[in-house]
């Protein structure tokens, strides 16, 4: 498994177990701003996830992450990760096309 996918799985695991402070530390400020308008549509609490690799180009690794919660609620986000100052970070969050 590539380091980017290992990071992404760890992030999704944190999100699915309510470790909010830790997941926020995985985001760049730009990604944090992109997440805010989508947050209301996410399962709360998220209880599971599924990750699918979409693409890899240069330093960017793109994943579709589907978070699931109670009552079959789910939401998918396209998350781009790259190394920033030696640490993997989520640099972009958007809705998949």
Image (tube, rainbow, N blue to C red):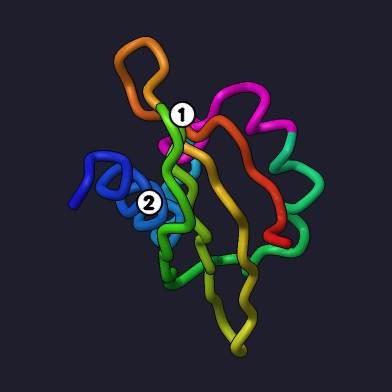
Give the residue at x 57% y 82%: 70
Magenta range = 22-33
Q: Residue at x 38, y 51 (%)?
A: 14
Counting from the top left corner in percent of width and height, residue 97 is at 73, 62
Residue at mark 2: 14
Instruction: Mark 2 and mark 1 in contact? Answer it, CB < 8 Å.
Output: no
Assign a secondary structure to mark 2: helix
Q: Any magenta on residue 24?
A: yes
Q: CA distance from mark 2 to mark 1?
A: 11 Å
Q: Position of residue 23 (x, y in %)?
A: 46, 40
Which class describes the residues within 10 Å of circle 1: few (<14), some (14-19), or many (20+)? few
Q: What is the x, y in percent for residue 5?
A: 31, 49
Main SS type for the magenta part?
helix
Q: Nearer the viewer, residue 83 or 68?
A: 83
Who comes first in sequence, dot 2 or dot 1? 2
For mark 1, give the secondary structure.
helix
Magenta span includes 36 = no
Residue behind mark 1: 25
> Is 36 positioned to the left or the right of 8 in the image?
right
């Amino acid at each position: 498994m590539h380091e980017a996918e290992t990071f992404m799985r760890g992030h999704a695991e944190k999100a699915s177990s309510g470790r909010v402070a830790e997941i926020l530390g995985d985001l760049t400020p730009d990604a944090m701003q992109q997440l805010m308008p989508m947050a209301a549509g996410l399962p709360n609490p998220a209880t599971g996830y599924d990750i699918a690799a979409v693409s890899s180009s240069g330093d960017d690794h793109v994943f579709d992450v589907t978070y699931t919660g109670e009552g079959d609620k789910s939401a998918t986000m396209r998350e781009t990760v790259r190394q920033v100052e030696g640490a993997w970070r989520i640099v972009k969050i958007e809705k998949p096309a």
